[in-house]
Image (cartoon, rainbow, N blue to C red):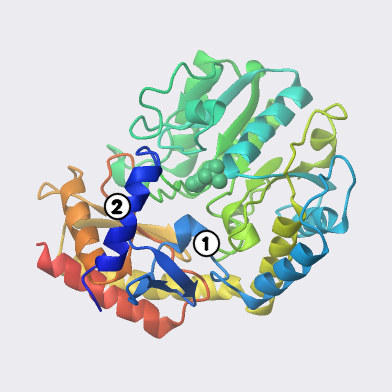
Amino acid sequence: MTEVPGPVSRAKLARRQQHVAAGVGTTLPVFVEAAGGGVLVDADGNSLIDLGSGIAVTSVGNAAPEVARRVAEQAAAFTHTCFMVTPYDGYVDVCEQLAELTPGDHAKKSALFNSGAEAVENAVKIARSHTGRSAVAVFDHAYHGRTNLTMAMTAKNMPYKQGFGPFANEVYRAPVSYPFREPAEITGAEAADRAIDVLDKQVGAGNLACLVIEPILGEGGFVVPAEGFLARLREWTQEHGIVLVADEIQTGFCRTGDWFACDHEGVVPDLITTAKGMAGGLPLAAVTGRAEIMDAVHVGGLGGTYGGNPVACAAAVGAIEAMRKHDLVKRARELGTRMQERLHAIAERHPGAADIRGRGAMMAVEIVGADGRTPDPVRVGSVSAHCHARGVVTLTAGTYGNVLRFLPPLAMPEHLLDEAFDIVSEAFDATA
Ligand SMILES: Cc1ncc(COP(=O)(O)O)c(C=O)c1O
């Protein structure tokens, strides 16, 4: 193992800096040449353990045989026709699978897009078209993407919004349930009523087209709202004809130990947005929902040149096949249990590791100072830097930048996860 990044990666980085816009960040500047089974092999020949999955994407691995084979076959047959011009089976196959796998047994339809942000934008378009209303409700600590509307929906200014306004209007923010940071004990239903009160008074339920929520907040720091929060919001949105959109772009497709995070509480949203893990690394996103809502939009109102590209659809069919075949729902739970054990062992020695949370293979630890509350992003930075130097790819998150999050590929063997957590544990000791 060379130092990380090694000399070859460092030379490549100089070229990257010359040609790639500075605004595109890099977590760990090693150049990858091969990846799979939870390992990234860099240009210096180092093997790094991947606890990030390219931000929750490579759940089935970086080169799952089911994905690679179908992608190669589809690329050899045709790479594009544009589904809006001349359709093909792969698009319909993905929509059929989404109808089967997403929560609820009502009639469902889907539309496919290229990125998560695009799916969220389209969910809002569909909800507005269906309800004839314009207001959109979102939450504190939310992340929904980097396009203009989704920047408005995203809570955190730096780095996502700074200098990029003006933003889309008619977006209203309500307080979320954030158990670790509540000033006093509050149930999920009470926290939902607190949000409902804000929306009712400041917007008016009758003006809301949709309420968009991540069932577990992703970039916001893997905040798991208290049990009952989502269910109470479901009840209220139903009462007032507000379309409930679950943004499952990060949580979906086995990541949380269920097919979808909403399944955990038995909540059935009206629309669900998916991307990331769905297509084994190829760009594909979807809005899936009640047929009557999806069909509210006039013909030609939804689409895009590449949305539901045939190669990306082939990848999704392969990824879903791998999820079923290897029972990745169960696998996510197993990895989650192991990560929790390892993180609790760290927290026993390091009280700054104050809140261990998440579900399934979407785990995080929020790190605070000696008072048990003040966010400590500096410690998170030094723990991460130690992990990176020792060849473990870790990601951070959180509104305060003080959350270490773990998203291993669901295909990762347990011994590799343990090896990675030995280094995470060592990183806490070394930076105490
Ligand atoms: C919950 C959620 N919504 C939307 C997005 C945006 O997805 P994309 O980066 O594919 O546009 C993300 C990406 O991290 C996400 O986690």
> Residue 361 — which label?
none
Task: Tell me what residue is drawn at x 80 percent, y 36 percent.
Answer: 294
Task: Tell me what residue is drawn at x 15 percent, y 64 percent.
Answer: 350
Residue located beneath label 2 in the image: 14
Vertical position of residue 238 compared to residue 2: above or below? above
Give the farthest residue toward the bottom: 415
Residue 253: give x, y in percent of width and height.
Answer: 61, 60
In the picture, residue 64 is in which quadrant? bottom right
> Residue 256 — which label?
1
Whether residue 28 is visible = no
Which of 45 and 40 lies nearest the eye of the viewer?
45
In the rendered structure, the answer to whether residue 37 lies left or right of residue 27 reads right
Q: Residues within 10 Å of mark 2 (few under 14, many from 20)?
A: few
What quarter of the picture does the N terminus occupy? bottom left
In the rendered structure, the answer to whether residue 76 lies left or right of residue 172 reads right
In the rendered structure, the answer to whether residue 109 lies left or right of residue 389 reads right
Vertical position of residue 396 compared to residue 300: above or below? below
Residue 63: give x, y in percent of width and height.
Answer: 58, 72
Task: Tell me what residue is drawn at x 32 percent, y 76 percent.
Answer: 46
Secondary structure under tag 2 reads: helix
Which of 278 and 74 lies nearest the eye of the viewer?
74
Residue 154: give x, y in percent of width and height.
Answer: 46, 32
Which of 277 and 260 lies nearest the eye of the viewer?
277
Q: Earlier in the sequence, mark 2 or mark 1?
A: 2
Label 2 close to label 1 by CB (< 8 Å): no
Query: Closer to the camera: disc 2 or disc 1?
Result: 2
Q: Residues within 10 Å of mark 1 (few under 14, many from 20)?
A: many
Amino acid type indicated by mark 2? Ala
Vertical position of residue 336 compared to residue 211: above or below? below
Task: Tell me what residue is drawn at x 32 percent, y 55 percent.
Answer: 13
Q: Is mark 2 within 8 Å of ligand 1?
A: no
